[in-house]
Amino acid sequence: MRQLVILLILLVSAPVSAEMPVIQLRVANHVLSTEVAHTQTSRTQGLMYRQSMGENRGMLFVFPETGYHSMWMVNTNIPLSVAFVDEKGVILNIADMVPHTRTAHSSAGAAKYAIEANLGWFWERGIKAGKHVSGLERAPAAE
């Protein structure tokens, strides 16, 4: 009986994490499998607390409005690069981010999306501002 009570306490106190949708993006002819953060909760959580991420994996942030957005690395353990993308799928700018910092990395223009990948993923593939991202239409709308 005591084990059942402990199990119930653990289940009730465990954080609830809804699985995010995953879509394939083509970033300048390179495939990136992305979890989609399209809700306020998933955008706020982002990649915090994770210890690693696969080589061609990332996270797509879908913002409710097109505008100047910023990202930071509080409680994020993985060094990341972020590409800010406009509503037409054009990369506006790419920034490298250091774990556990509060430095704001901002879009260079009005962005509808941000794509986080492992540090250097964009650079290693020669992806720069002005390149196109396809597959964004498969992402759920921002909530």
Image (cartoon, grey):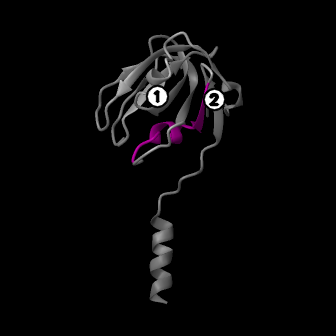
Image-quadrant location for residue 133 = top right
In the picture shown, does residue 111 fall above or below 14?
A: above
Please state which of residues 71 and 117 is positioned toward the viewer in this rendering: 117
Q: Percent position (x, y) of residue 37? A: 56, 37
Q: Residue at x 39, y 48 (%)?
A: 49
Using the image, tell me which numbered label, if any, was put on residue 25: 2
Depth check, front residue: 27 or 14: 27
Callout 2, which amino acid?
Leu
Residue 38 is one of the magenta-drawn residues: yes
What amino acid is labelled 1 in the image? Trp
* Residue segment shown in magenta: 30-49
Q: Which residue is mark 1?
A: 121
Q: Nearer the viewer, mark 2 or mark 1?
A: 1
In this view, the residue in front, 41 or 116, is 116
Query: How busy is the neighbourhood of tag 1: few (under 14 within 10 Å), some, or many (20 plus)?
Result: many
Please give the label number shown on residue 137. Answer: none
Q: Is residue 138 visible?
A: yes
Viewer-closest of 63 and 115: 115
Q: Residue furthest right?
A: 138
Q: Secondary structure at mark 2?
A: strand
Residue 38 seen in this snapshot: no
Q: Residue at x 36, y 35 (%)?
A: 79
